[in-house]
Image (cartoon, rainbow, N blue to C red):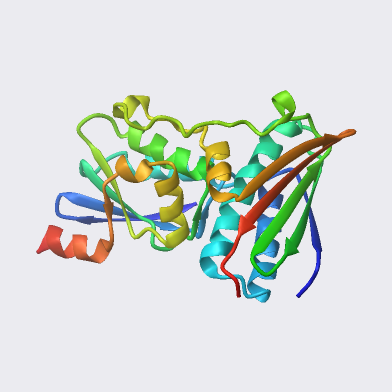
Amino acid sequence: MELSTTRHGDMAIATVIATRIDAAAAIAFKDAVRAAVADGPDHVVLDLRQVTFVDSSGLGAIVAAMKGMGAGRRLDLAGLTPDVAKVFRLTRMDKVFVIHDDPDRLIARATG
Amino acid sequence: MKAEVTFTCDATALDVRRMLAELQECLAVETIADDDRGTVDIALAEALNNIVEHAYHPDTPGTITLTLWIGPTRVSCELRDKGVALPGLEPPHAAAPDVTGPRETLPEGGFGWSIIHALTARLCYLRDGAENRLILDFDIASS
């Protein structure tokens, strides 16, 4: 599972380069996020624009990644595609995470 | 419109992914709307993950058969496997896990059955001899 991380001021954006975070990908995803956020800013945004499918294993991996960041650090989400948004809504995880529409707009604000 | 289509896969996460891709291709050919295709993809993935994780032992993954029927306003999917029966011989009526607590208590699993219940119009399970049969019906926008 590939993640591309870029830093913008006090924020890092980790872009998932995959279309599915499913049961077959969940463990690799969790490891990739842990490595990507190990050092760097306290505020990380997971860019999910390329991801068209997340199942409950993938959702669990995203929650685990957020919990693993520890107190005082923040993992937001951005660019949810329709089926991914549906899973977050059904599980009420859309109330747990701060969800941004467009990562590019966040970058403009962070570096503006 | 095809009356009935059958798919099979091994009970592994990777082969489930392959079969779900075939199912999606078939639904696209039958011009099922994107939103309905997504609903079927999500619910089937959860049901198939349950079979991979709980019905079969990971060392001896058996076969899963998926039969698809498409009607004017309904998609029906039947999953068959020869693994362990569902406890209580019915689909668990699991409520969605509580996500209102502090960060360290947030659930990382247990969402599957609540997602399946929320997305299906009807869910039916039967133990048929040595076989599990789970039927998931979806209401779809008429095309």
> Going 50% across and 32% down the picture, which residue do you hit?
B95
Residue B109 x %, y %: 50, 33
Give the quarter of the image for residue A97. Answer: top left
Is residue B111 shown left or right of residue A43? right
The C terminus of chain B lies in quadrant: bottom right
Q: Is residue A51 visible?
A: no
Report the front residue among B111 and B1.
B1
Report the front residue among A70 and B109.
B109
Q: Is residue B41 visible?
A: yes
Q: Is residue A79 above or below residue A56?
A: below
Q: Is residue B124 above or below residue A105?
A: above
Q: Is residue B68 above or below residue A56?
A: below
Q: Disc count in the image?
A: 0
> Going 64% across and 47% down the picture, which residue do you hit?
B122
Residue A13 x %, y %: 28, 54
Residue B7 x %, y %: 79, 58
The N terminus of chain B lies in quadrant: bottom right
Is residue A25 shown left or right of residue B106? right
Give the quarter of the image for residue A66. Answer: top left
Report the front residue among B139 and A62.
B139
